[in-house]
Image: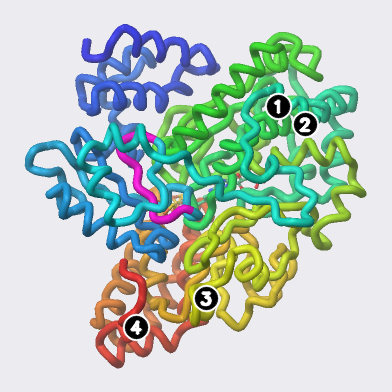
């Protein structure tokens, strides 16, 4: 046996939470990786015993996830090179770390101490640049000269790190209901109850499930996970109960560069999320809820697990759960480094302990979701919106925001602004205010060249379009979308081909590979942009790129390919002159641009 008896006990305990043991497979792989620092055939065979799987079957699942496929070393130094981190100097961090560790990016140092890995967005874009060593809490706002201490003794430096900066804020004059007061975390259940928490779930418990769904539908709540679908309406898609289990699956995978709001809410107000999950579960008459938290969010995962433990300890969850008059459970599962597991059906596959490859639809999750049973998927922040709606009513909710985009939301702002962070504001704030009033504006003398409004899949805007209100309908008038409301700002020095290249690299890396158009199209886009950026582009490359986007768009199993093509097409359309200048100058004409 390679793993300790304690590790096996932990795995057995976790298996008890799932209708099928495989629900605990990713958890088990994490336990094994954290304890031994490796994952190999021997360990796969040992884990397989718990799940009735062969070593090969476990290996197949593990092969899908970045976290389970890192080079073996004592300290795996993961530097985020997503777009917001690149805009804040991530390349300089990689270079300095390579020098100090003696390991080139993607390799292990000769003494086996360090592995250098460039990773995609860690969901902390407001504190870019970000480094994570093994599965430890992040080191945020890393300066190149701080790496000497960090890498001399990573364990001690992580222990001594300052507390994670609270980058989420309630601006003056905003009536907030998502974030706790500025500077505070509301982690303990008593604190949450003192602030009025767990009253909405009691109120909802006295309502008919259909009335809860109708209230949320009438309030016009739209999902905060990116697609903006009407939440109350989605809840009505669940079939009538048939006596069997039915589930709520809560999406806390948050992996799209520019998006870092769910982490803030989980780390600062975990019981609000739980209360929202409970009410949503009542509305759909779920027998249990499962939360899927991205694997890198070790702190949020710990905080949510502790909040759940506390909720059981005081009888809010479990037998006769608050408001349910029956047993109700919430379980929590870790992801393992795959953006595609945020796509709802990819997430369901991953939750079942499989590769996170999206499912073909129909059947939709409401018909056949988790373990083939009716399931609703809601985003983490979407759930957190629900208690305020139930407590205060439809008119109260609709009094904030814009037509068809009601309520507050957690706006993100990152990139070239002085005060990147999360701001709780009503939908419809002007992009200009988000950048200048809340985000603190740009460095002296700099102007906005571009802004991506909501995570990198959303079509980019030019600097002369920032007077648009940021809500679903207004953004459509400028041919873009709200997405996750995480804006990324690029100043006038930035090379747009380079920005498009970093984004294309992300999609190429994250495509699950099932659809030819996505697999080939994301790779082709990345390689073509790389050539153009290096000054080796040809005039006809721009037409080839446009053809590639058409080849990908609307033809695949899930919307990753659409997002990849929308993003790349918008950069080419809005900033074609930048592309042409690269081709004619045969080099990048923006010497002061951020490095990739
Ligand atoms: C490639 C891809 C990645 C996604 N990632 C996330 C994610 O990390 N978190 C999330 O809530 N939704 C994500 N979504 C959207 C989900 O598929 C789904 O629409 C959402 O979780 C539903 O919740 P909502 O209605 O509350 O927004 C993603 C979609 C796609 C196509
Ligand atoms: S579109 Fe891309 S990510 Fe989505 S299923 Fe197809 S190959 Fe996978
Ligand atoms: S944390 Fe680095 S890009 Fe998001």
CA–CA distance between discs 2 and 1? 6 Å
Question: Where does residue 205 sit, x and y in percent of width and height?
Answer: 84, 23
In the image, is 189 to the left or to the right of 336? right
Residue 445 visible within the image: yes
Could you say which quadrant of the image residue 249 lies in?
A: top right
In the picture of the structure, the residue carrying the numbered disc 4 is: 590
Magenta segment boundaries in residue numbering: 127-136
* Magenta span main SS: loop
Looking at the image, is mark 3 or mark 2 earlier in the sequence? 2
Q: Which mark is residue 195?
A: 2
Disc 1: which residue: 191
Q: Which of marks 1 and 4 is nearer the N terminus?
A: 1
Q: Judge by depth and name the residue closer to the eye, 153 or 81.
A: 153
Q: Where is residue 491 in the image (x, y as percent from the top left)?
A: 47, 76
Question: What residue lies at 51% left-to-right and 38% top-to-bottom?
Answer: 347
Between 501 and 365, the one lying in front of the other is: 501
Q: Which circle marks residue 221 in the picture?
A: none
Which residue is pictured at 37% across the width and 79% down the height?
A: 544
The first of marks 4 and 2 along the sequence is 2
């Amino acid at each position: 046996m390679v793993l300790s008896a304690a590790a096996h006990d932990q795995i057995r305990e976790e298996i008890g939470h799932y209708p099928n043991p495989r629900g605990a497979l990713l958890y088990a792989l994490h336990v094994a990786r954290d304890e031994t620092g490796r994952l190999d055939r021997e360990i796969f065979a040992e884990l397989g015993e718990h799940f009735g799987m062969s070593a090969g079957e476990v290996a197949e699942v593990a092969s899908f996830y970045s976290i389970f496929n890192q080079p073996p070393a004592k300290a795996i130094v993961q530097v985020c090179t997503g777009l917001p981190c690149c805009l804040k100097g991530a390349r300089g961090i990689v270079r300095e770390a390579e020098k100090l560790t003696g390991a080139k990016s993607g390799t292990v140092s000769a003494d086996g101490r360090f592995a250098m890995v460039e990773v995609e967005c860690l969901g902390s874009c407001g504190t870019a640049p970000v480094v994570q060593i093994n599965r430890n809490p992040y080191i945020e706002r890393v300066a190149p000269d701080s790496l000497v201490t960090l890498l001399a003794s990573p364990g001690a430096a992580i222990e001594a790190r300052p507390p994670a900066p609270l980058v989420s804020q309630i601006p003056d004059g905003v009536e907030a209901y998502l974030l706790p007061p500025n500077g505070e975390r509301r982690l303990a259940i008593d604190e949450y109850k003192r602030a009025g928490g767990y009253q909405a779930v009691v109120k909802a418990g006295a309502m008919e499930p259909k009335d809860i769904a109708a209230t949320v539908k009438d309030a016009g709540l739209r999902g905060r996970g990116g697609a903006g679908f009407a939440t109350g309406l989605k809840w009505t898609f669940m079939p009538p109960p048939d006596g069997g289990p039915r589930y709520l699956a809560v999406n806390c995978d948050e992996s799209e560069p520019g998006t870092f709001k769910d982490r803030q809410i989980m780390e600062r107000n975990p019981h609000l999320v739980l209360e929202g999950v409970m009410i949503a579960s009542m509305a759909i008459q779920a027998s249990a809820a499962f939360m899927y938290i991205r694997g890198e969010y070790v702190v949020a995962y710990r905080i949510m697990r502790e909040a759940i433990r506390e909720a059981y300890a005081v009888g809010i969850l479990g037998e006769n759960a608050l408001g349910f008059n029956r047993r109700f459970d919430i379980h929590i599962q870790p992801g393992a480094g795959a953006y595609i597991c945020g796509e709802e059906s990819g997430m369901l596959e991953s939750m079942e302990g499989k590769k996170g490859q999206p499912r073909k639809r129909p059947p939709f999750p409401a018909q056949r979701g988790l373990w083939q049973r009716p399931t609703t998927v809601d985003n983490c922040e979407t759930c957190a919106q629900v208690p305020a709606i139930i407590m205060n009513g439809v008119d109260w909710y609709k009094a904030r925001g814009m037509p068809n985009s009601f309520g507050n939301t957690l706006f993100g702002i990152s990139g070239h602004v002085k005060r990147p962070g999360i701001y709780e504001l009503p939908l419809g704030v002007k992009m200009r205010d988000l950048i200048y009033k809340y985000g603190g504006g740009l460095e002296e003398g700099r102007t906005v060249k571009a802004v991506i409004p909501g995570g990198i899949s959303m079509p980019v805007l030019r600097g002369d379009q920032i007077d648009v209100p940021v809500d679903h309908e207004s953004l459509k008038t400028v041919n873009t979308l709200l997405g996750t409301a995480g804006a990324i700002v690029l100043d006038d020095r930035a090379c747009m081909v380079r920005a498009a290249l970093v984004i294309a690299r992300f999609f190429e890396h994250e495509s699950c590979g099932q659809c030819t158009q996505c697999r080939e199209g994301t790779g082709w886009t990345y390689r073509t942009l790389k050539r153009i950026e290096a000054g080796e582009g040809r005039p006809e490359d721009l037409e080839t790129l446009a053809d590639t986007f058409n080849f990908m768009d609307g033809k695949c199993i899930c919307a990753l390919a659409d997002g990849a093509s929308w993003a790349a097409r918008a950069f080419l359309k809005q900033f074609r002159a930048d592309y042409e200048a690269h081709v004619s100058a045969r080099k990048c004409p923006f010497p002061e641009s951020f490095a990739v």
